Image (tube, grey):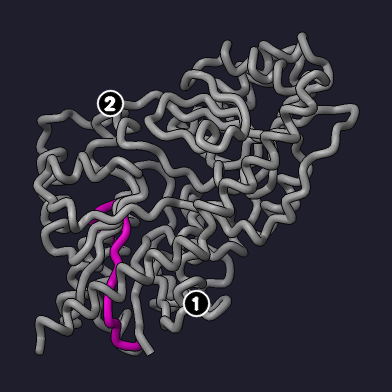
Amino acid sequence: MKTVWIVNHYATDPNETASGSRHFSLARGLAQRGWTVILLGASTEHPSGRRRRDVSDRRFTDRVRDGVTFRFLRSPEYRGGVGRLRNMLVFTAALLRQASVRDLSRPDVVVGSTVHPLAAWAASVLARRAGVPFIFEIRDLWPQTLIDMGKLSPRGPLTWMLRRLERTLCSRAAAVITLLPFASEYLVSQGVPLEKVVWISNGTDAHDFDGTPPVDGDEFVFMYLGSVGRANGVRAIVDGFLSAAAAEPRMRLVIVGDGAERRAIQRRAEESEHSARVVFEPPVPKDQVPSLVGGADAMVINILDLDVYRYGVSMNKIFDYAAAARPILVASSARNNVVSEADAGIVVPADDADALATAMVSMASTAAADDRRRWADNARAHVIANYDYRALAGRLDEVLVRCTESARGRKR
């Protein structure tokens, strides 16, 4: 049986949270195709920095779910940037410690995934030790994303180090997987051969959702489900809703998630005369998402207007929204747009609270009932055809098989 190790510092068991489950979904699909899959992650959750449930004080904790083995390496809890950096360094060191992986089935291939590149670098070291191909998965373009968000100088020393590390990892990799549909343009500009680059989008487990469209009632509930940080644009969603609330008294807004911006945004909502119509709920495990989304009439998302999105976006939440057969209101100026592709809702410019307000009133109006039914049907059909994790796992399987067979051919 073939074995793959997938290194993702923030790998998540869907029993724990709704975010970070990409690799579990892909791993489950690989297991169904005959792979032994081992997911290597940290004992702490992200973004909370808290220790996961049911992990021990030992060097690592193993957990098996649907044929996939998780190995969570002991890492310190953290709050803030300095603590998170320490957590990254400790996890990287733990990953490189031979005792952390000695008892595992020897890999035929190792996948190293960002967000932070140190985890991917450590995965490349594990692949070299085992003498097997290394696959580099880029989920965020570091340092380009940080530059575009104004967190790094284009010419600073840290930027230079990150670019050098990125090029090193691309050079070591037998294949480079990107989640963004146009990231090949960026990678080629950095010297990566085009034939090395493979696009495997984020997606959803569409069969987990019953796909029943919403039924019109006395209230109209918009829902946002995901992290509540600066990069998630939730402030504009809440501002837009508060501006629109007087025009459409049926509307409510439910924010489900946590993050650095949540308290400030919640205080902002509480100062409004419409505060009772904005509800903040804690994050939920992935397996509770289908029933939760079933209580919404429409989903809303705001994608910040960043230069890096010229390479496209790939957000799990938007595929979950579509799989649930919910109309989607998206504020985005990114180069690709699933809602536009599918005719699954309304698209307005990125981070535009006024445009979001107008669109909310339009989408919630009784006159839009037929449109909402069409959008819901289109959303689910499009995601099943293009972004179901069962199909995406098949694409990953093809990449892994090609790289392992090519490596064996070179050894003969």
Q: Which secondary structure lies at badge 1?
A: strand
Crowding around mark 2 (Cα neighbors within 10 Å: few <14, some 14 to 19, many 20+) is few
| C-alpha separation, residue under disc 1 versus residue under disc 2 | 38 Å
Q: Is residue 254 magenta?
A: no
Q: Which sits earlier in the primary sequence, circle 1 or circle 2? A: 1
Image position, residue 316 (x, y; %):
51, 48
Q: Nearer the viewer, residue 120 or 181?
A: 181
**Residue closest to the eye, 242 or 203:** 203
At 28% across and 28% down in the image, what residue appears? 148
Q: Amino acid at mark 2?
A: Gly
| Residue in view at x 43 percent, y 43 percent | 314
Q: Is residue 116 magenta?
A: yes
Tell me the kind of residue under disc 1.
Answer: Val
Q: Is residue 24 left or right of residue 165?
A: right
- In the rendered structure, the answer to whether residue 130 lies left or right of residue 233 reads left
Pinpoint residue 36: horizontal percent, then vertical percent: 42, 83
Nearer to the camera, 309 or 58: 309
Name the element at disc 2. Answer: loop
Point 77% across, 28% down: residue: 370
Q: Which residue is mark 1?
A: 68
Q: Is residue 350 visible?
A: yes
Quarter containing the N terminus:
bottom left
Discs 1, 2 touching: Cβ within 8 Å: no
The stretch of residues the image draws in magenta is: 105-119
Numbered mark located on residue 150 in the image: 2
Decide: few, some or many residues near mark 1? Use Cα within 10 Å; few <14, some 14-19, many ≥20: many
What residue appears at the point 68 percent right and 20 percent down from the top-left corner? 360
Residue 83 visible (yes or no) = no
Judge left or right: residue 164 versus residue 223: left
